[in-house]
Each structure stands twice: as C-alpha cells, then as structure tokens.
Image (cartoon, rainbow, N blue to C red):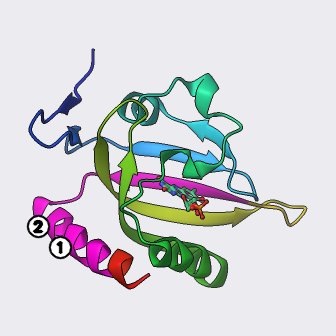
C-alpha cells in the first residue's frame, strides 16, 4: 500500500510529490491529530504520536533558530512557512516544506495545523547547507 521508500545510501525517506503530511497540535504543541502518511513516514503508530510534543520528530540537524522563527511568526502573523528535516523513529530522516497555521476557537483557545508537502531537491540542498551553518553558529 505504501508509496514511501528509503534511499539506502543516505537514509533519506521519500514520498510522492502529490502527498500531504498533516498534523494538528493543541495550544502547547502537543499532537492531537496526524494523518496516515505522517504516521507512515515518521515510523510511528497514531497511538504513539497522540499526546506527544511535536518535537518527537525533531531532528538534531535542525537549528533552534528555525523553530524560534516558526513560533514567532505563528504568534505574530498567524502562520509560518519553512523547510524542516524530521527524524524518523527507527532510522533515517525526511524533508518537508511546511505551512503552520494558528487558529483560535470561540473561547479564544489556539490550536495549530501543519500542512507539509515535498520540497524540491534544490531547496533541500540549500537548506541542508544553511541549517548546518546556523547550527555551527548556535
Ligand atoms: C503544528 C505544528 C507542527 C510542527 N511540526 C514540527 C515538525 O514536523 N518537526 C519538528 O521538529 N517540529 C515541529 N514543530 C515545532 C515543535 O513544536 C518544536 O518547537 C520543535 O520541534 C523544537 O522543539 P524543542 O524546542 O523542544 O527542541 C511543530 C509545531 C507546530 C505548532
């Protein structure tokens, strides 16, 4: 059933161009929803993800500055777009181009959605270098 695969040379996981990797968190960044592809590509069951902080898929190559930018933009502008490399549970990693949206319910309580698509190889190369530089500077 699965359309995902790992490049055995790099351990990078790939998924179809047309796919969406979706998740939702509560106000504290705790996962309250993930779609089937999220579970598949991250290597977790839905049960393992629900109730966990979103940093469960955080990859050590991601600079702190990127997530600071995410949260600052989301709080200030209501959304953020950017490139993220995530870590799969067992082995390997996968790149996403993510849009994170903040929404507020009638009681004023926020929740967050992330809609992720496949980045171009050019972007992956560019952000691999940029994030390595930012990590070095941190
Ligand atoms: C809707 C939403 C989706 C997120 N998706 C990811 C993600 O795919 N990967 C990730 O590492 N962090 C993601 N984050 C950011 C995490 O909440 C967290 O800030 C980040 O992993 C850094 O964690 P740390 O500060 O505990 O190291 C997301 C946050 C929100 C609100």
In screen coordinates, is 38 left or right of 103?
A: left
Counting from the top left corner in percent of width and height, residue 46 is at: 57, 26
Extreme-right residue of the structure: 107
The residue that appears at 60% across and 74% down in the rendered structure is 71
Residue 114 shown in magenta: yes
Q: Position of residue 100 (x, y in %)?
A: 52, 63
Q: Are marks 1 and 2 in contact (CB under 8 Å)?
A: yes
- Give the percent coordinates (x, y) of residue 56: 55, 45
Q: Can you identify the residue that label 2 sits on?
A: 122
Residue depicted at 43% across the width and 33% down the height:
89
Residue closest to the eye, 89 or 38: 89
How far apart are the two marked residues, 1 and 2, measured between alpha carbons? 6 Å
Q: Is residue 14 magenta?
A: no
**99 is higher (above) or lower (below) than 20:** below
Report the residue marked by disc 1: 126
Residue range highlighted in magenta: 111-133
Q: Which class describes the residues within 10 Å of circle 2: few (<14), some (14-19), or many (20+)?
A: few
Q: Give the answer, above or below, for where 137 lies relative to 35.
A: below
Q: Which type of secondary structure does the marked residue at label 1 adopt?
A: helix
Q: Is residue 58 left or right of residue 26?
A: left
Q: Secondary structure at mark 2?
A: helix
Q: Is residue 133 left or right of residue 58?
A: left
Q: Quadrant of the C terminus?
A: bottom left
Measuring 23% from the left and 29% from the top, which residue is drawn there? 4
Residue 94 placement (x, y as % from top left): 29, 46
The image shows residue 39, relative to residue 99, as above or below, that is: above
């Amino acid at each position: 059933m699965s359309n995902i695969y790992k490049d055995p040379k790099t351990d990078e996981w790939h998924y179809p161009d047309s796919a969406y990797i979706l998740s939702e968190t509560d106000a504290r960044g705790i996962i309250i929803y993930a779609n089937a592809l999220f579970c598949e590509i991250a290597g977790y069951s839905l049960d393992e993800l629900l109730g966990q902080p979103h940093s469960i898929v955080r990859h050590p190559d991601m600079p702190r500055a990127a997530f600071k930018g995410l949260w600052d933009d989301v709080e200030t502008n209501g959304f953020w777009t950017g490139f993220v490399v995530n870590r799969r549970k067992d082995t390997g990693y996968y790149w996403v181009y993510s849009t994170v949206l903040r929404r507020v319910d009638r009681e004023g309580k926020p929740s967050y959605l992330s809609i992720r698509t496949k980045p171009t190889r050019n972007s992956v190369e560019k952000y691999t270098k940029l994030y390595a530089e930012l990590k070095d500077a941190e």
